Amino acid sequence: MRNAVGREIPERIGDRVLRPFEGAFATSNDRPKAPRPVKSAPRQEDKLVPSIDAAIEACGLSDGMTVSFHHMFRDGDRVVNQILDACARRRVKGLRLFPTALFPVHEPVIEHIRSGVVNRIEGSMNGPVGAFVSQGGKLAEPAVLRSHGGRWRAVEAGDVEIDVAFVAASQADSYGNANGVHGPTPCGTVSFCAVDAQYAKKTVVVTNEVAPYPAHPMEIQQGWTDYVVEVDEIGDPGSIVSGTLQLTKSPTRLRIARLTADAVVASPYFTDGFSFQGGAGGISLAVTKYLGDEMERAGIVGSFGMGGATKLLVELLHRGLIRTILDGQAFDLDAIDSLRDDEAHVLIDPGLYANYDSRGCATYKLDTAFLGATEVDLDFNVNVNTHSDGQLLHGIGGHQEVAAGAAMTMITAPTLRGRIPVIVDRVTTVTTPGETIDVVVTERGIAVNPRREDLKERFAAAGLPVRPLEEIKAEAERLVRPIGKPVFGDEVIGVIEWRDGTVIDVVRKVEGWT
Amino acid sequence: MHTGSEAKGDCLVEVRPEGHDGITIETKSKELLGAGIRSAVAETVAVLGTGEVALRVSDFGALDYVIAARVEAAVRAAHAGTIPATPSVDRAASDRDGPRRSRLYAPGNNPRLLAGIDIHGADCVLLDLEDSVPPEEKAAARILVKHLLAAVPFPEEVWVRINPLESGGRDDLEEVLRGRPHGICLPKAESAPDVERLAEVLSGIETELGMPVGATWIMPIVETARGVLHCEDVATASDRIVAVAFGAEDYTRDVGARRTQESLLFARSMIVAAAKTAGVQASDTVFADLGDEAGLAAEAALARDLGFDGKGAINPRQLEVIHAAFSPTDEELSYAQRVVDAAEAAEAAGSGAVALDGRMVDKPVLERARRLIAYGERLAGGRDTR
């Protein structure tokens, strides 16, 4: 069957029935949420167990179960590998891995797939695990990729039933209250998996600091927690700042950032109370910096900046240029400090941030957002999941919900990465539909979605280089000969869900090349 | 024999010895990129007319024109080849009095820094073969600059700074004129004959290439004590000159000065006076401290006050400040408009004398006002020039 962005989607894969994407806000998920398991427990002094092995034993973790994790330590995480190694030692087989995201540090997962400890993954795969799965590393079912809010929704809807949730927390008390801001290695927030902790049949808090009762903030509550285990190491906060979190020095990228900031200033949204979300990419960080200066110059105070909170966003708060930070996850150590110390730095979980099945999520209050892209096509569809060679290498993150939510969604991307064009006829994979994308900013000009003639006029009036996307694409293509294109077979290796649970695209296995 | 490098945006080309044949491509993704790179290499080899050559090309994200340049440089070095007939370029001539608020330098042998140098809205892009290119890379650099010129339709002016004529400059010209730059920057210009020699070489090559003789502008760079003292001779030495530039780095070294605004004042004033005597533009030196935006703004404002029309930039980040300094202000434009309006009103009334706010407006003031308005319209009508 063909979905609303023209992608061919199988009607079912194994036992899983796929619902085709119908439009960004077309689905009405009008049904009750899945029941949460009742967790009543007798009075007890503490829930401490002596080791990971003991926790696994106590949970009755066994073959075929679903285990969940959060990714707040990003590339510094030490919990996923520890737990899976323990499972391997205990000869557990056929686990379904349900992380919020995997990073290069999780490369050992590949070995666990090979040996059969893990045979399914539902979650974003950044790096080697994605490459392995793409190159034929066989999973029993296709990987399922969801946005942050989409994952939360899937748990609430009962699409994924979690057997054991492992919550890495930088501080917890022995009765199961846990947080991410205190302790020797804070990671910012652990609320990312609050839904896991509530819906899982068993919840294990894994911490490297057991504090006297009551530990707080109670991001994870004692009423959800079955066991607490203390380990030497849960993560390296230094590696939270992984890779992308550098202000760019590239003149091309700085020009994109400058044009983006200028377009925001020229838009109707740049008034008192203005709100925005920037990500952690080099261009996005530079836009945040430029916007701060523009707000100061114009005497505008923003209502909130949303993150992925970074040092730059915290600086805007401290300079009085935004009243609030709504923080879904901390992208660097300055953000973690601010989350702990600044009253106006407000923690929001992915449900509040982005859940489609809610009566309004935080992204819907965004005036604008600037997001990255691996590819953008002439229908303004965006791909962030696969490379142009068809390999599954990145997660969705908050891309879908921010694009759907912001009044003006801007994609910032260079026209070429090395010899690989970013603006294409048709994206390799649709992550986010063109109907939610308003503006594409490249170093060669600004393209405006035909749905937004109003913006086009304002940008042109401000002297910004507004050009058709086709023209920008052609200009970049003059510099490089066409690249090869993967030929896809029938076998589906990944399912890309839209945030409402429908399927916006599938990733098929590469079988050859044009 | 190698050319190129392993830097991002470049490629490394090796002409392989006897016993090898064909073209070997090494790249991050053979399936994705291999065929495109192979076709770029093969086309270049065919043009060079050396017949079969054995090449190994290792790609690090090079654009087509970089691949063509690296292959040409490697093959010509190995086979003592001559300059091929292609690429040939058709570039629209520029206006001799057009805006030159900025001249943005880019090192001629660095593909990463050259990529996208055309997009920043500089009034003049200046591809450098002189100080930023080490001696052993000069040959490869002039070939790279030629291919860049051929591949990229620069929206504003594009210039090449050559080496001194007696040390590589002639070879630079033979190569890069095929890319039809709007003009040539002559470093260390000190006398009329320096410029005349360049003009003569240009005429020879223009004739050889079938270009109109005189099509290529000259911008002498005055950057020595001797140059400053003779800058009137320099500025008036050729009709090809459209601007005279100042180079403070070499000048301070030459005279033993510390670089302060005071120590540069004499040279700057001399250059402005010489340029204006010749009826051409004056372009100020570069400001090297990239982080000091306020310092750049102050220096650009001073240069503007002195009569300069533009200033060098070492990074696109400097363009916004420089363009702001050398663009007419709204006040200047509206005053000029009032002058012109007053003149038109006087003419309509049949009066020879033009007065504005109780003061007489003489002819040079009126002409200057008209020029300013035309210049302002040009800047506003151009593409994104911020």
Image (spheres, coloured by chain):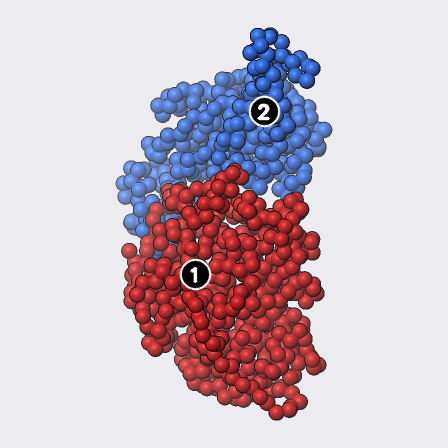
Which chain letter goes with mark 1? Answer: A
Whether marks 2 and 1 lie on the same chain:
no
Q: Which residue is mark 2?
A: B282
A164 left or right of A175 in image = left
> Would you say residue B112 is visible in this rendering?
no
Q: From the image, tell me which residue sits under label 1.
A: A24
Quadrant (top left, top right, bottom left, bottom right) of the N terminus of chain A: bottom left
Residue A226 is left or right of residue A487, and the answer is right
Seen in the picture, residue A469 relative to B299 is either above or below; the reply is below
Chain A drawing hue:
red
At x 34%, y 49%, the residue is A482
Residue B318 sits in quarter: top right
Q: Which x, y percent locates residue A315?
A: 66, 55
Q: Taking B44 as reference, is B252 above or below it?
A: above
The three-letter amino acid code for the residue at tag 1 is Ala
Which chain is assigned blue?
Answer: B
| Residue at position x 67%, y 39% in the image | B294
Between A84 and B236, the one lying in front of the other is A84
Helix, strand or loop for disc 1: loop
Which subunit holds the residue at mark 2?
Answer: B
